[in-house]
Image: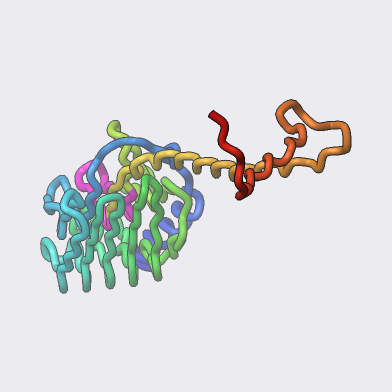
Amino acid sequence: MSKTAHASAGLAVVIGLAFSSVLPAAAQETTGTATSSAFALGAEGLIAIQPTPHLTGEHGFQQRSVLDLNVAGGLVEAGVLNTEVDTYRAAASVTDLRVGLGAATLVDLGLGDLAATAVEATCEQGQGDSRLVGASLGGIALDAAAPPNTGVDVPGLATVLLNRQVTGDDGSLTVTALSIELAGLQSIDIASATCAAGAETPAPEPEPEPEPEPSKPAEPEPSEPGDEEPGDEEQPPPAPRPTPIRGHHPVTG
């Protein structure tokens, strides 16, 4: 068996035993006024890659893509890098990904490549998640929907965090689908999205109570004989008008 075959077999054993949650899961309920942001690829260390393509959501919805990326002689290759953001939402994705771990001085260790058909991170209203499609490290399949901060360790050589979630001091949540640390010399982040919790929704004002309908006046009850009230006595009919009588009367004087 060749050295490469031995190294790959050793990696399989190490990875099989080293899946773990190496960081506490990020809090799901956060508050703050941070601006959402996203990038598909970024790296620090021996080879630096500015976050690409990088967007922030301070001006509302934006979307950007980069096609056919090849960085540093094969350190990272990708088909499509896409980011999109809105006020309280961010997402980043990469297709046809290949990270050549040997390009970061690990060529003699036989670690192989990290590859994936698709990598995606999403974050909205302070909650997020990530998804991998067809992902593998050195030929070993990676969990497609790993819990937050699931670690794959190659002791002393490399650490890969799946679905890395970190809450910032401002209350924002950052979700990185793949976060790679190589021998303390190189870090690579694939598909990273940051968002803040949405503004608190004010409690709805109580609806005004309907005004009561005016009550109808009570109809007077018919009075019984002998129950007349003062002022209700029967009045006599008016006197007849006098009728003049024509005739002759003697005149005295």
Question: Residue most toward the right?
Answer: 225
At horizontal 40% and vertical 48% (from top left) the residue drawn is 127
Q: Position of residue 122 (x, y in %)?
A: 34, 56
Mainly helix, strand or loop, the magenta region? Answer: strand
Question: Residue most toward the front?
Answer: 253
User: In the figure, is residue 30 to the left or right of 214?
Assistant: left
At horizontal 61% and vertical 50% (from top left) the residue drawn is 246
Q: Which residues are magenta?
A: 175-191
Judging depth in this view, the residue of 102 and 108 nearest the camera is 102
Q: Can see residue 243? A: yes
Judging depth in this view, the residue of 218 and 170 nearest the camera is 218
Quarter-of-image position of residue 178:
bottom left
User: In the figure, is residue 170 to the left or right of 153?
Assistant: left
How are the residues colored? Answer: rainbow
Q: Does the stretch in magenta take in 177? A: yes
Q: Position of residue 46 (x, y in %)?
A: 13, 48
Judging depth in this view, the residue of 195 and 191 nearest the camera is 195
Quarter-of-image position of residue 108:
bottom left
Where is the N terminus found, in terms of image quarters?
Answer: bottom left
At horizontal 28% and vertical 33% (from top left) the residue drawn is 170
Q: Can see residue 22? A: no
User: In the figure, is residue 60 to the left or right of 205?
Assistant: left
